[in-house]
Amino acid sequence: MDAPSAPPTQAPPLQAHVADGLAGAIGNTPLIRLRRASEATGCEILGKAEFMQPGGSVKDRAGLGIIEDAERRGQLVPGEPGIVVEGTAGNTGIGLTLVANARGYRSIIVVPHTQSREKLDFLRMIGADLRLVDPKPLRDPGHYVNTSRRIAEELAAKGERVIWANQFGNLANAAIHEATTGPEIWAQTAGRVDAFTCACGTGGTLTGVARALKARNPKLRIVLADPMGSGMYSWIKTGEVKAEGNSITEGIGQASAVPGNLEHGRDSIDDALQVTDPEALEQIFELQQHEGISVGGSAGINVAAAIKLARQMGPGHTIVTILCDGGARYQSKIFNPEFLRERGLPVPPWLA
């Protein structure tokens, strides 16, 4: 057998720190310099690699924060039976279910059946009691959020120890990002960060990070990234929720109502940017093909917004965004050429 052409990469030395269970493994994700975006803009564009969380997304933080808050309030008691109920596009349900499993609770997760098959399969695999519903507007009693609240109320009326996680209105969501994600970004950049941008699903990540960073540098720029079909761009710009167009992205953007977590952080948000599906897909496919970083639709929105923001601000700035989850969660959609062609969206060469 021929000798290897070069010695193998040395493994890093073992660290003394050992995470204490699942909760101890959530957080402290790396910042990744996005080379092509940085070179194209003359800025340092950095992505917080939340796809490296134990459950595969930024929503692991929300799941931990919401359940720990419920325990502090006595609504759940570790070691005793309890139920966590939530309506979600998928990733928050995964984070909640994994933390609930680690704490000994059951989880009931209500999801629109239109969400990616990969997320639904993962929820079933990890033991969630998955309830699929038809997609409905928020005002409809059958909307997934309203359905989950009703299930929680019915269980509570039967005497069960249960919480409705309420990720959109539960401020424990933003609080964990203010306590962890924002300070991590500040430390990882040694305070040399000029702007932060990310999309809003519940508003927890944007609000929490904004509050943490603004507390350390009030001049730091915070910008909401919004897909088409969402009214949050209009709300930031005009005060009115007005949605136009549509998007294939899942779990971000709100067409008709401002989430409580986002309202809570409005004073910390300086501006908003809109991103189209083709703009997001271009970044997703380029990151995968040229940098080996596989991400989902919301991360594509975020990176495209970071590039737009960098061009507004000019060269020499450092801009941070969130790489929310991995591309494998969307193989049946944004990496499915038939799905893309049906919607007139670009298909990457390696899939065509």
Image (cartoon, rainbow, N blue to C red):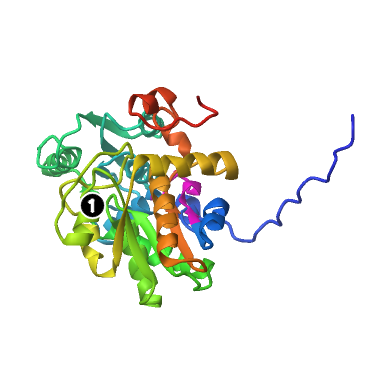
Q: Is residue 288 above or below residue 340?
A: below
| Residue 33 % position (x, y) | 56, 57
Q: Which residue is more in the foreground, 291 or 150?
A: 291
Whether residue 71 is visible here, answered yes or no, is: no
Left or right, 349 with reference to 198: right
Q: Is 235 included in the stretch rendered in magenta?
A: no
| Residue 226 % position (x, y) | 30, 51
Using the rendered view, name the quadrant where residue 305 is placed: bottom left
Residue occupied by mark 1: 168
- Residue kind at label 1, given as amino acid type: Phe
| Residue 208 % position (x, y) | 33, 63
Which residue is pictured at 25% across the width and 54% down the height? 233
Which residue is pictured at 19% across the width and 40% down the height? 148
Characterize the local packing of mark 1: few (<14), some (14-19) or many (20 or more) Cα atoms within 10 angstroms. Answer: many
Q: Which residue is more in the foreground, 186 or 285?
A: 285
In the rendered structure, which segment of residues is drawn in magenta? Answer: 47-58
Left or right, 349 with reference to 300: right
